[in-house]
Image (cartoon, rainbow, N blue to C red):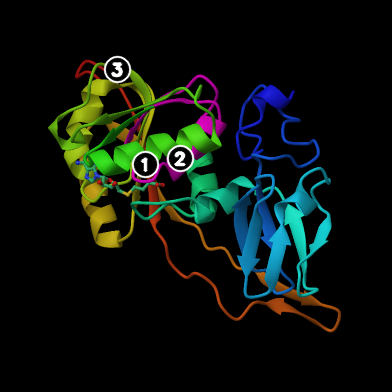
Amino acid sequence: MLEDVGPGGLSLGRSAPQAGAGLLQAGDRVLLIDAKRRRYLVRLRAGASFHTHAGIVAHDDVIGIPEGSTVTATTGRRFLVLRPSFADVVVKMPRGAQVIYPKDLGAIVIAGDIAPGCRVLEAGVGSGALSMAMLRAGATVVGYERRADFAERAEQNVAEWVGAEAAYTVEQRDVYDGIGPGPWDRIVLDLPEPWRVVDHAVSALRPGGTLLAYLPTINQTAQLRQALDQAPFSLAETVEILRRTWHVEERSVRPDHRMVAHTGFITTARLVVPPTETL
Ligand code: SAH
């Protein structure tokens, strides 16, 4: 089903679980990975070459081979060739704003219960990394983004990596001013003052719907939690994701010395129907 493959060969479409499985071809995006596991994202073009300090790799040596192969540069150095995973794309793709890291994207999709057919209102959209994760999960996403240049970048990233047919639109607008007609199943926020969206969310979200906010500091998180407490939201929860990689060698199996200690806090809450006095 090659027609379902994104331009980078990344299989993001719901209908194409096997997409991107064929031989590497011109137009595909691939990672060239050196012995030190440094990754270079390259789009294959017939006749082109990829230059690094470790030598030159001819794209024509890569076109037509299966991913997982190793190619040799002019210097004799070897590169493993693989199509990028979604996590690879997120950290390598062009960005205007800081993207949400893969460890948090995964948690947000589950904490926000983002599922096929979900109508999601997302603000701000930034570089579109979170949009891509939610589209991959099958949601329909409408993004609000204050900055025109970021809105455009996010649309380009989504078109390139998820596909031009993705259920995605971005509007250049300020979510603090209000939310257009819903109802929305989910409202997902990655911006500095999400408490300013809580009242809008009460009218725009359907009962039982989820508001999710991603915030870098606990001060902001506490302010959001206060606003949620004063509105008809229930089951509010805040989590952070600590991801520790391990060094695994025969005689030395232990956690790596370094880890990313902090990125952001994920807060979720469900909109409820306020109980009436008679109840
Ligand atoms: N989640 C994004 C990154 C978002 S960065 C990603 O994964 O790529 C935060 C974004 O929120 C910025 O692009 C900023 O312009 C936007 N923003 C800030 N306040 C906003 C508001 N009130 N309405 C809409 N967008 C806003």
Dot label at residue 153: 1
Give the percent coordinates (x, y) of residue 179. 22, 26
What range is drawn magenta here?
115-141
Q: In the picture provided, is 252 more to the left or to the right than 204?
A: right
Q: In the picture provided, is 80 more to the left or to the right than 217?
A: right
Determine whether label 2 and label 1 are within 8 Å by CB. Answer: yes
Residue 113 visible within the image: no
Is 205 situated above or below 124?
A: above
Question: Which residue is at the front of the view, 205 or 234?
Answer: 205
Label 3 – label 1 distance at C-alpha: 25 Å
Label 3 or label 1, whichever comes before in sequence order: 1
The amino acid at mark 2 is Asn
Is 73 situated above or below 140?
A: below
The amino acid at mark 3 is Gly
Bin the neighbour count of mark 3 within 10 Å (Cα to Cα): few under 14, some 14-19, many 20 and up: some
The amino acid at mark 1 is Arg
Point out the residue furthest to the bottom here.
251
Give the percent coordinates (x, y) of residue 50. 64, 60
Q: Which residue is mark 2?
A: 157
Dot label at residue 182: 3
